[in-house]
Image (cartoon, grey):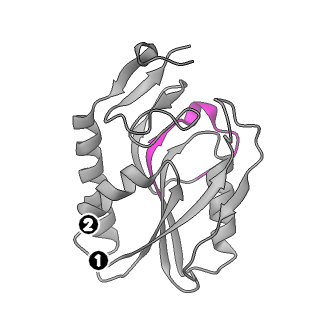
């Protein structure tokens, strides 16, 4: 069983807030005069997405897609499964995918490929955290919040076996 004492703060809630505000300004600037569909990748992105949209002063719609790659544990087997698809059509829409972390790239690549099949007018990616040291699949991130080291992180929506999502900071899970 993992204990709270096995966590060390990597990114404080203040740093997260500053990053979210910066990303919101970048998104607003690029989507002026548009009405994008923001697609949150469940479950991890929900905290980040909620904070991000509160800083966006523009028309937008929300939807969610749920995929599973880390169905249990800290290692992804590389198999991604669609658990819940969007309720909104993306054809011709400006779609912005909101993700908590881009790690190996397998999960978000699966999501982006899936959405491209719906023929959106544009498709971009906004990720709170990026872990390029673990990348296996090349992914272009249009809006990058923070680059993180090769460590297992939790908090602010990120979990380990459904635990620690509620932490206000992003922490490294010490083994």
Quadrant for the N terminus in the image: top right
The residue tagged 1 is 32
Residue 56, position as x, y percentages in the image: 26, 66
- Name the spot of residue 152 as percent of width and height, x first: 54, 26
> What range of the chain is rendered magenta?
126-139
- Which is more toward the observer, 87 or 132? 87
* SS at badge 2: loop
Which of marks 1 and 2 precedes in the sequence? 1
Depth check: give the residue in front, 10 or 47: 47
Look at the image and say whether residue 127 sits in the magenta stretch. Answer: yes
- SS assignment at label 1: loop
Q: How many marks?
A: 2
Query: Could you say which quadrant of the image residue 58 lies in?
Result: bottom left
Residue at 73 percent across and 51 percent down: it is: 80
Q: Is residue 24 above or below residue 17?
A: below
> Residue at left 25%, top 62%?
54
- Image coordinates of residue 53 in percent, x first then y, are 30, 63
- Residue 70 highlighted magenta (yes or no): no
């Amino acid at each position: 069983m993992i204990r709270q004492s096995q966590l060390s703060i990597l990114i404080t809630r203040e740093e997260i807030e500053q990053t979210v505000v910066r990303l919101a300004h970048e998104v607003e600037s690029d989507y002026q005069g548009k009405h994008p569909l923001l697609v949150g990748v469940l479950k991890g992105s929900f905290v980040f997405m909620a904070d991000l949209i509160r800083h966006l002063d523009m028309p937008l719609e929300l939807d969610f897609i749920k995929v599973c790659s880390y169905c249990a544990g800290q290692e992804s087997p590389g198999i991604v499964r669609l658990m819940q698809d969007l309720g909104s059509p993306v054809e011709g829409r400006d779609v912005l995918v909101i993700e908590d972390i881009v790690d190996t790239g397998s999960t978000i690549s699966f999501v982006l490929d899936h959405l491209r099949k719906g023929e959106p007018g544009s498709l971009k990616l906004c990720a709170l955290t990026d872990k390029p040291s673990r990348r296996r699949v090349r992914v272009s991130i249009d809006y990058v919040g923070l680059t993180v080291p090769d460590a297992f992180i939790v908090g602010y929506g990120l979990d380990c076996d459904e635990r620690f999502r509620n932490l206000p900071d992003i922490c490294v899970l010490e083994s």
